[in-house]
């Protein structure tokens, strides 16, 4: 038994964790309420090692937001704009393809595409975008759309959700994103994202996608007005759907960012709160293989530490991120692949470049690193390095 666990009030849970037994919701709450972060981290690291050994992953990807116009006004959201606002944007399909073309030259394997619920773009815009991107490079993995976007697209297409997803899949969609889960508790959801889909509707979109053979990630926005019990309830609902479908490839806890919105919370979750949430996610979500430390929201240094608290993935190079940045996240938008590899190595783990479905592409088990991309070849990269 780990030294920290031996001396901790949490030591009674060690045998259960070591045996890979499922934790109850009451035990998850007890872990979240504990102040013994070292013992919690040791337990989570034990659970992570059973899943991923000495490896931790990252992905070479690029984010594209096709538009920030949205018909909804979620209280926590600093990203959305109305048409009357002066700083909204929308991209043509050609502009999205140009961004993809440039990012392919940087070696990306995944394009991550989300936007607001646009008031007037037709369904064909979305299917046309997917087809154009696959025509550019059929190997490019397209991880697109949150559950609420899918419901919006179903409304545009005048089709049931499952048929809409089938249409999107035919057009080239590879994976759904996990965004929009926020917190499932309906009272809290009403306080931070009034008008958004319910927990049941979020889960139903993912269930329908999984039944089509698709995979997706899922998220939890934590550190705002929710209670610790709300976090456990959220995780329990995700665990139950995973028991049913096995369609989630990974879980991404997202720390709340407080700027430019109406929620009366002044600071983002502390490092302590972020680490205990990641650790409990690892321990409670026993049917998930991968827990991501999302460096955009955590900052790279805390994300690196999270690799010792249950996380096994640092997410990606990203290149250009609007949603967290507009809400106050301070870290730069681009992480060079070499930086992700270095962070994983410094944490004592072997870096693995993965694809959208967490399948390994390259294991960096020597001392080598990829050549740094040359900013002179990439206007977007140059801009992000300059502002980073
Ligand atoms: S969180 Fe999404 S659905 Fe809500 S206002 Fe922002 S862009 Fe729109």
Image (spheres, rainbow, N blue to C red):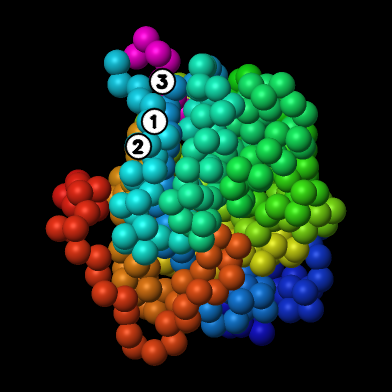
290 or 190, which lies in front? 290
Q: Secondary structure at mark 1?
A: loop
What residue is disc 3 on? Answer: 81
What residue is disc 1 on? Answer: 92
**Which callout, 3 or 1, points at the residue further toward the start of the chain?**
3
Tag in front: 3 or 1? 1
Q: Residues within 10 Å of mark 3 (few under 14, many from 20)?
A: many
Estimate the x, y position of residue 21 in percent, counting from the top left. 81, 71
User: Residue at coordinates 15% horizontally, 58% vertically from top-left?
Assistant: 376
Q: Residues within 10 Å of mark 2 (few under 14, many from 20)?
A: few
Image position of 25 (left or right of 265): right
- Quarter of the image for residue 105 reads bottom left
Q: Secondary structure at mark 3?
A: loop
Query: Real-space Cα distance between discs 1 and 2?
Result: 5 Å
Q: State yes or no: residue 82 in magenta.
A: yes
- Quarter of the image for residue 153 reads top right
Query: Real-space Cα distance between discs 3 and 1?
Result: 17 Å
Query: Real-space Cα distance between discs 3 and 2?
Result: 20 Å
Q: Please indicate, yes or no, whether residue 249 appears anywhere in the rendered image.
A: yes
Q: How many marks?
A: 3
User: Residue at coordinates 70% horizontally, 34% vertically from top-left?
Assistant: 164
């Amino acid at each position: 038994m780990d030294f920290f666990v031996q001396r901790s009030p949490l030591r009674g849970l060690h045998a259960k964790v070591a045996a890979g037994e499922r934790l109850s919701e009451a035990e998850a709450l007890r872990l979240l309420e504990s102040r013994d972060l070292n013992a919690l981290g040791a337990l989570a690291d034990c659970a992570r090692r059973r899943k991923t050994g000495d490896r931790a992953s990252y992905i070479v990807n690029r984010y594209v937001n096709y538009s920030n116009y949205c018909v909804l006004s979620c209280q926590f959201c600093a990203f959305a704009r109305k048409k009357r606002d002066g700083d909204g944007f929308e991209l043509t399909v050609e502009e999205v393809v140009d961004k993809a073309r440039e990012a392919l030259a940087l070696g990306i394997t995944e394009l991550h595409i989300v936007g607001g619920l646009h008031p007037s773009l037709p369904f064909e815009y979305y299917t046309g975008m997917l087809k154009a991107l696959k025509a550019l490079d059929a190997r490019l993995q397209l991880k697109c759309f949150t559950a609420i976007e899918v419901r919006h697209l179903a409304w545009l297409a005048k089709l049931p959700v499952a048929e809409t997803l089938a249409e999107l899949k035919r057009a080239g969609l590879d994976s759904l994103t996990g965004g929009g889960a926020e917190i499932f508790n309906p009272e809290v959801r009403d306080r931070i994202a009034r008008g958004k889909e319910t927990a049941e509707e979020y889960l139903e979109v993912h269930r329908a996608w999984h039944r089509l053979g698709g995979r997706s990630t899922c998220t939890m926005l934590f550190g705002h007005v929710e209670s610790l019990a709300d976090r456990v309830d959220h995780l329990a609902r995700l665990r139950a759907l995973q028991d049913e479908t096995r369609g989630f490839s990974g879980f991404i806890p997202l720390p709340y960012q407080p700027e430019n919105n109406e929620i009366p919370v002044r600071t983002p979750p502390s490092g302590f709160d972020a680490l205990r949430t990641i650790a409990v996610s690892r321990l409670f979500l026993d049917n998930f293989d991968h827990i991501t430390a999302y460096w955009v929201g955590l900052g790279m240094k805390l994300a690196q530490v999270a690799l010792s608290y249950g996380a096994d993935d640092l997410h990606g190079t990203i290149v250009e991120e609007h949603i967290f940045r507009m809400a106050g996240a301070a870290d730069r938008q681009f992480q060079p692949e070499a930086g992700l590899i270095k962070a994983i190595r410094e944490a004592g783990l072997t870096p693995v470049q993965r694809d959208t479905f967490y399948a390994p592409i390259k294991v960096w088990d020597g001392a080598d690193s990829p050549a740094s991309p040359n900013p002179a070849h990439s206007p977007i990269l140059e801009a992000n390095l300059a502002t980073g």
